[in-house]
Amino acid sequence: IFAKIAALSEKDILALDTETTGLDVIEDKPIGVSLCFEKETAYYIPAHEVHLKYGSLLGSDSLPEYSVETVWSGLKKSLQSCQALIVAHNLKFDMHMLFNMGIDLFSHTFACTMVAAWVCDLDNDVGFSLDALTLRHYKLEKIPTSALIGKETKRTSMLEVPLHELSQYACEDAEATFKLWSIFSKKIQNNEEFNHLFFKIEMPVLKVLFEM
């Protein structure tokens, strides 16, 4: 997977999403990253001791074990090598989380689907969450976060979620982001005003906000 990421060119799209211990960009840490760079396919890379030691996607005891350091080192090298457009929903949050692990993606061209929806989805009456936009544009009801953590499950952290459940949830997020960008990017590219607002104003402002 790292080799595939590193080989992505500037013509490619790489949608990503981080799963984390919480929502505090200073105190919390990412525990895994989901990636989607082709239709109907997404990957989840667990990156925390709990999931690397006690679970595997295939449920096999014979799979090789990887250290947290190996995973983050591989992600860093592959992401820094790839030339693809980096896309995420609420991009600033994911950028913060990856930066906490030593991965700086601001040298890439990047796009936030949440901001893109605000720019070009003019008749939006459902809000800008990933779940709402996916339902609106693809009639797909995503797995809600409440199905993994919260009162219904009595779990308080994503680290308590079984790896196979977390992987499905995370991959769905990355694929949904990839698919939403396929819609919004066409609207932005085909409208000079949208294009200027998004790439010349909103994305540079996002970088400034990240650095504050």
Image (cartoon, rainbow, N blue to C red):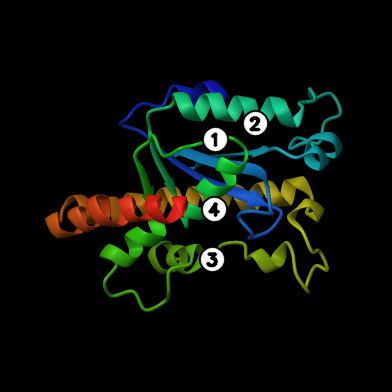
User: Would you name the residue on which mark 3 appears?
Assistant: 141
Which residue type does callout 3 highlight?
Glu
Residue 180 position within the rendered picture, expressed as x and y whole percent measured from the top left: 39, 55
Instruction: Inspect this view and state whether residue 58 appears.
Output: yes
- Name which of mark 4 and mark 1 comes first in the sequence: 1
Residue 77: quadrant of the picture: top right
Which residue type does callout 4 highlight?
Asp
Residue 195 position within the rendered picture, expressed as x and y whole percent measured from the top left: 20, 53
Instruction: Inspect this view and state whether residue 183 appears.
Output: no
Dot 4 falls on a residue whose secondary structure is: helix
- Name which of mark 2 and mark 1 comes first in the sequence: 2
**Residue displayed at 36% across by 33% down:** 12
- Name which of mark 3 and mark 2 comes first in the sequence: 2
Viewer-nearest of labels 3 and 4? 4
- Name which of mark 3 and mark 4 comes first in the sequence: 3
Residue 95 position within the rendered picture, expressed as x and y whole percent measured from the top left: 51, 46
Q: Are marks 4 and 2 in contact (CB under 8 Å)?
A: no
Dot 1 falls on a residue whose secondary structure is: loop
User: Would you name the residue on which mark 2 appears?
Assistant: 72
Which residue type does callout 1 highlight?
Ile
User: Would you name the residue on which mark 4 appears?
Assistant: 173
**Residue displayed at 72% across by 52% down:** 165
The crowding category of the residue bearing disc 3, from other C-alpha atoms within 10 Å (few below 14, some 14 to 19, many at least 20), is few
Residue 1: quadrant of the picture: top right
Viewer-nearest of labels 4 and 2? 2
User: Would you name the residue on which mark 1 appears?
Assistant: 103
CA distance for labels 3 and 1: 32 Å
CA distance for labels 2 and 1: 9 Å
Which residue type does callout 2 highlight?
Trp
